[in-house]
Image: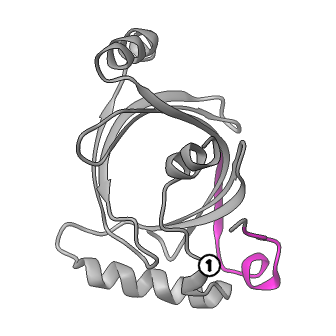
Amino acid sequence: MEFDYTGNDIVNADMTFVSVLHQYDTYFNCSKGRLKMREEKDEISGFMSCRLIHYVRENTLCPKESNVLISLVKLESVEEYKELLGRALGVLVVVEKVRSLYTMRGRTRVHFDNVIGLGKFLEIEVVLDPDESVEHGKVEAQCIMEQFGIQNENIIAESYSDLLIAARK
């Protein structure tokens, strides 16, 4: 479901603007979880980066835990790594988006995403300390959802990559 993030609950939220990020995610076939190479350009500073990201997350209609492993890729090696992984695993799908990034409550990231081929979405990411429980993060995410007027039925279980794959069938 495409999300209209111009409502008063969103506009009046106590958020801090961080940046606008142009993200180009190449997803590779992977037997467990998801594996993507994220090429990112900060549209404010011009800073460019690339990361190889593996994550495991259930497709559920509620706030969910992600187990993530991230490795920085040197910019001069991006094309070489992308070709190597593409040859070895195969490219599954490419997701391109412009992300307006805000923070809230010090550690929660709020993403306003405009995904090419899908539309506009809002994503809430609560970054937990190592000693915090997943349940604590879910409660915080649920509080922010309530503040924004987001119901559980508005949650999309799948990732953008899953939605793009489904759209091409």
Residue 25 appears in the picture as rendered: no
List the single residue furthest toward the left: 131
- Left or right: 47 in relation to 157: right
> Above or below — where is 115 with respect to 92?
below
- Left or right: 43 in relation to 74: right
Crowding near the residue tagged with mark 1, few <14, some 14–19, many ≥20 C-alpha atoms within 10 Å: some
Quarter of the figure that contains the N terminus: bottom right
**Residue in the image at 29% along x and 37% along y:** 30
The amino acid type of the residue labelled 1 equals: Asn
Q: How many marks?
A: 1
- The boundaries of the magenta stretch are 3-20
Residue 33 screen position, x and y as percent: 29, 48
**Residue in the image at 37% along x and 81% along y:** 138
> Above or below — where is 3 with respect to 74?
below
Question: Which of 108 and 57 lies nearest the eye of the viewer?
Answer: 57
- Left or right: 107 in relation to 101: left
List the single residue furthest toward the front: 169
> Above or below — where is 158 with respect to 27?
below
**Residue in the image at 33% along x and 19% along y:** 85
Residue 151 screen position, x and y as percent: 60, 87
**Residue in the image at 33% along x and 12% along y:** 84
Secondary structure category for the residue under label 1: helix
Check residue 9 for magenta coloring.
yes
Residue 31 screen position, x and y as percent: 24, 40
Q: Which residue is mark 1?
A: 154
Q: Quadrant of residue 128?
A: bottom left
Q: Quadrant of residue 112?
A: bottom right
